Amino acid sequence: MSFSPARSRATGRVTLADVAQLAGVSPITVSRALRGERAVDPELVARVRAAALKLGYVPDPAARALASRHSSHVAVLIPLLSNALFVDLLEAVQRTLRPAGYQTLIGITHYDASEEELLLREQLLHRPAGLLVTGLERSEATRALIAQSGVPCVHLMEAAGQPGIHSVGFSQVDASAALTRHLLERGRRRIAFAAAQLDPRTMQRLQGWRRELGAAGLYDPKLEWLNPEPSSLALGGRMFEQIMAQKPGVDAVFFCNDDLAQGALLTALRLHIAVPRRVAIAGFNDLTGSDQMLPPLTTVRTPRAEIGSAAARMLLSLMHGEPVATPCVDVGYELVVRGST
């Protein structure tokens, strides 16, 4: 006997009931199997998926959201997609959420508080199951939106340690201080700090640099090179050239991101400035290619993939109503010493 699906009269779509009939299970079993719930018998999951594939069934997210009072997607707000750091983080988030039946809906804030607020308002209209947001600093209006929505939320890249805040990250201040101490231990005394973008995490790195140099009695505000332009190799090269021309006594430059430092190393080669003999160069984040520079770049390795997967696991617990033993997870960082210092 052939099976003829009873398509929805309104839309002509194959329905959940059609899949259930073909698979010989209940509609609720179909729903649970397609969501990836572990409690469903693997043999039933295989039958359901085979039936769904044969019928060309595509779940209706609007109907699911209406039935469950929220959708099966997680809203993820990040500053940029052009930075490999956030790409690595997003891939880890998706690898963790997708097997659990959740999709990611990405919003790009461009480090703009008003844009973040607008994106969040738009996302909340779709009743997300959860939120992942970057950092801890945002407008009061956005804080209120998150708090009043009732949607589980985890903050990325920074460790909050504040009551009621769930976060996964590390101390940007401490990581920056560790790199600065390394430069001091190598005998550097005129250490410049060069930064772009000037987002909150960059300014926390500036704070760590200031703290260590201040403790050593070597802090000089004239060695701060802060540029609001987006971070790039080209900008790093220009900043390095300016520093060496205007502050010839500088014996080390701490760049707030690896792309800036990579640009500086390329410029040093072009200008025949010996690194690290004449000047040490260090970066932050250990981006792709840093270990291939000439010389290889000393940097701070930030565990963005670990942050993404740990934050997604924490959010899954919150979305399932399970207790979270450690609401603030500090994944730490690693100082990677290479030939540039």
Image (cartoon, rainbow, N blue to C red):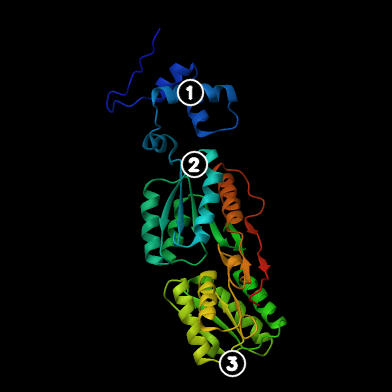
**Are dots 2 and 3 in contact, CB under 8 Å?**
no
Q: Which of marks 3 and 1 is nearer the N terminus?
A: 1
Q: What amino acid is at disc 2?
A: Tyr
Q: Quarter-wise, where is residue 336 in the image?
A: bottom right
Answer few, some or many: residues within 10 Å of disc 2's Cα (few below 14, many 20 plus, some between 14 and 19).
Answer: many
> Disc 1 versus disc 2: distance between alpha carbons?
20 Å
Answer few, some or many: residues within 10 Å of disc 3's Cα (few below 14, many 20 plus, some between 14 and 19).
Answer: some
Q: Which of marks 1 and 2 is nearer the N terminus?
A: 1
Instruction: State the mark number for residue 102.
Output: 2
Secondary structure of the residue carrying tag 2 is: loop
**Are dots 3 and 1 in contact, CB under 8 Å?**
no
Query: For mark 3, what is the residue?
Result: 249
Mark 3 or 1: in front is 3
Residue 183 falls left or right of residue 236:
right
Mark 1 or 2: in front is 1
Residue 187 at x, y percent in the picture: 70, 85
Q: Does residue 197 appear in this view?
A: no
The quarter of the image holding the C terminus is bottom right
Q: Residue extending furthest top?
A: 1
Tell which of 61 and 190 is nearer to you. 190
Query: For mark 1, what is the residue?
Result: 50
Q: What amino acid is at disc 3?
A: Gly
Q: Is residue 229 above or below residue 73?
A: below
Which residue appears at 62% of the width and 88% of the height?
190
Which residue appears at 41% of the width and 25% of the height?
16
**Are dots 1 and 2 in contact, CB under 8 Å?**
no
